[in-house]
């Protein structure tokens, strides 16, 4: 049921129906929140809170997105995409310290990932820019 609601949210988003997308992803997160232990199968491929955070980032709502990514990590620690989402949200909010910490954590989590992943490039770019800014 969670994945069905997520799929409907993504379909609504793709169709330009922001209100419908948010309503469906809220339904998915409510279902997810009703499950006490997400580590038990069947585990959703993308936790609803993580997907909600991704949608909110696209809607330029980084503060709301950050809360959903943090909830994802509370329920399922160590999820790289949630860590990356927090970094992106923090960057958008101007919280450079949190962005730096989370991008660094993300790179450590994905150290064995395909090196051409755009997420890795974005994290490295941000950290590289931060290193240049701190040089006198």
Image (cartoon, grey):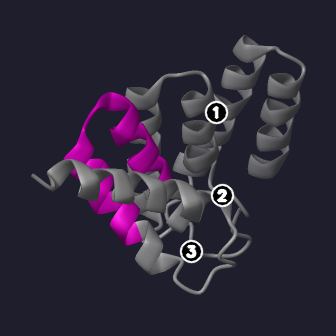
Residue 14 in the image: state x and y as whole percent: 86, 27
Q: Nearer the viewer, mark 2 or mark 1?
A: 2
Task: Name, please, the residue furthest toward the bottom.
Answer: 112
Compare marks 3 and 1 and give the one earlier in the sequence: 3
Residue 107 in the image: state x and y as whole percent: 45, 72
| Label 3 neighbour load within 10 Å: few <14, some 14-19, many 20+ | few
Which residue is tagged 3?
Answer: 39
Q: Nearer the viewer, mark 3 or mark 1?
A: 1
Compare marks 2 and 1 and give the one earlier in the sequence: 1
Q: Residue 71 carries which label?
A: none
Q: Is mark 3 on a helix, strand or loop?
A: loop
Q: Which of 44 and 103 is in front in this view?
A: 103
Residue 2 part of the magenta segment? no
Quarter of the image where one finds residue 128: bottom left
| Label 2 neighbour load within 10 Å: few <14, some 14-19, many 20+ | few
Which residue is tagged 1?
Answer: 55
Q: In this view, does 106 lie above or below 129?
A: below
Left-right relation of 98 to 46: left
Q: Would residue 30 be visible to someone looking at this image?
A: no
Compare marks 3 and 2 and give the one earlier in the sequence: 3
Which residue is tagged 2?
Answer: 118
Q: What element carries label 2?
A: helix
Q: Nearer the viewer, residue 18 or 113?
A: 113
Q: Residue at x 41, y 38 (%)?
A: 89
Q: Rounded to the nearest whole Å, what is the CA distance between mark 3 and mark 1?
A: 23 Å
Residue 46 in the image: state x and y as whole percent: 68, 57
Q: Give the range drawn in magenta.
A: 84-105
């Amino acid at each position: 049921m969670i994945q069905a609601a997520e799929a409907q949210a993504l379909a609504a988003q793709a169709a330009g129906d922001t209100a419908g997308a948010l309503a469906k992803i809220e339904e998915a997160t409510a279902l997810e929140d009703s499950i006490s232990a997400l580590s038990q199968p069947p585990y959703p491929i993308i936790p609803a809170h993580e997907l909600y955070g991704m949608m909110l980032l696209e809607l330029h709502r980084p503060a709301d997105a950050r809360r959903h990514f943090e909830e994802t990590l509370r329920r399922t620690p160590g999820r790289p995409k949630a860590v990356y989402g927090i970094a992106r949200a923090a960057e958008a909010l101007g919280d450079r310290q949190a962005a730096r910490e989370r991008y660094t954590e993300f790179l450590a989590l994905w150290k064995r990932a395909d090196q051409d992943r755009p997420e890795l490039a974005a994290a490295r770019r941000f950290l590289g820019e931060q290193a240049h800014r701190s040089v006198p």
